[in-house]
Amino acid sequence: MKNTQSSRSSKRQSHTRVTFAKVLRNTSLYGAVLLFLASLILPNATALAQSKSDSIITRNVIVEEGDTLRSIAKREFGKTGLSSMLANFNAMKESDPVSPGQIIRIPLFTPVERQFATVIFAKGTASKNAEPLKRDDKVYLNELVKTGKDGFVSLQFASGSVINLQPLTHAKLEKLNCLETDDSCLIRVRSAQGEVSSDVQRRDGQPTEFTINTPYASAAVRGTLFEINAVKTDILVGVTEGEVVLESGANDDLPLDQGFGTVVGANTPPLDPIALLPAPVYRYIPTRAAKGDQVSWFSLSDVEQYLVNISTDENGQQVVANYNETQSILSIEDIDPGEYFFNVRGIDNYGLKGIKSPTKIVVAAIDESIEPVDTAVTRNGNEFLVNIIDPPESAPGYEIQVSTSADFTDPLSVDVNNSGTAIFRLVSDKIFSRARVLLDPEKVSEFGATAESN
């Protein structure tokens, strides 16, 4: 496989940096510092906070003879160094004199509830700080989330951004400031091992910095959809939408555009951008898939294996089953009846996952109490008439399949009413047919015997 070259930039341009000077100008953060110091000498300081929102309330003090802003800061907060912030809050300069009887406002910051991510999906073995994790749980800073061999977890942030933790993943939130009232949305996640994918959402007018840190590299998101996988010796990064800037120990940033990925080893620079495998094209998707039915797609070149994901949502977050296949075909087994999204993608020899190819699929249950039905095929030129033999009067309808091969790897399927008759026009010397009773879209009988044309 040929690698696509891309220019490298030494600095990221689009991420918001919060400087110390900015923090000093941020009234809410400044008030939070004062509240912390005030609580050291004012036991009831927290009780004076009357709201749980990001707001400042005040307490007035009267200047006494000989007071200065420095002495008031020392008396009220225990630290003279806060006199400049006290002056700013009262629209004064630190050097301004104060007079006896003058009122100075003392700011008290209302405590803010800790920010968190919410579990919107959890399946299989998943824990937070060794305790079982379930839907609607909250995950706070530095709480370790782990998934087992069968574990999947999706976390959603206040901005709507989502991260998905795949099996055998360890991750924790390192930084989280992402309320609508924050100057910017800052999310930092650390993953020591395993695979994390992201779907980054942005509020209008709010800069966003979303970073996932791993042992060898950090991926900073400029786009929306990407995956990062920390395996034993390498970090794998693939971008399916937008752009990611990869920072590694080699002190060199590598921008990755949509449709590209790379591999980073310990203390080594990342490989030049590698084009991800394209989305597979489906060859056959059954009208409904009961146990034993197959979904197939056209093979990709340079593919090591295929990853197949069945989920209840198009984004593949609420996973029902995962499969790794070496051939471009999958037999449906042990999936509950219902509507799902079937998603297949190729994996190259680097281990990078290609572009997804989602499609809807209906899974039906087999009712073994219903007697299967057989078919007969009559040919008239290029037309083939398929009839259900002795159709039961109680059957609502049938699904009839025809194929040019006896293994039905690429069949044509139609639903018919209880008359049990269908006509197919095919350019073929011979066709094979079979049918099953269609009770409803999610319940069928077994297929009857296979018939062939004369």
Image (tube, grey):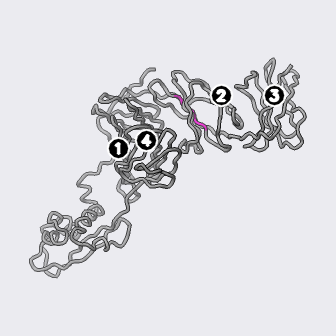
Marks 4 and 2: CB-CB under 8 Å?
A: no
Residue 265 vs residue 424, the one in the foreground = 265
Marks 3 and 4: CB-CB under 8 Å?
A: no
Residue beneath label 4, please? Answer: 223
Say which amino acid is labelled 3: Ala
User: Disc 3 to disc 2, how far (Cα)?
Assistant: 24 Å
Query: Viewed as shown, does residue 328 lie left or right of 407?
Result: left
Say whether disc 3 or disc 4 marks the residue closer to the N-terminus: 4
Tell me what residue is drawn at x 54 percent, y 32 percent. Answer: 307
User: Which circle, 3 or 1, is nearer the viewer?
Assistant: 3
Quadrant including the N terminus: top left
Mark 2 crowd level (few <14, some 14–19, many ≥20, 10 Å Cα): some
Say whether disc 4 or disc 1 marks the residue closer to the N-terminus: 1
Q: Is residue 296 visible in the rendered structure shown here?
A: yes
| Outermost residue to the top | 429
Q: Which residues are magenta?
A: 342-346
Above or below 388: residue 187: below
Residue 283: give its label.
2
Q: Secondary structure at mark 3?
A: loop
**Magenta: predominant secondary structure element?**
strand
User: Disc 3 to disc 4, how far (Cα)?
Assistant: 53 Å
Q: Secondary structure at mark 2?
A: strand
Residue 48: give its label.
none
x, y percentage for residue 182? 36, 57
User: Disc 3 to disc 1, how far (Cα)?
Assistant: 64 Å
Query: Viewed as shown, does residue 99 lie left or right of 32?
Result: left
Residue 400 placement: quadrant: top right
Mark 3 crowd level (few <14, some 14–19, many ≥20, 10 Å Cα): some
Residue beneath label 3, please? Answer: 449
Residue beneath label 1, please? Answer: 14
Say which amino acid is labelled 2: Arg
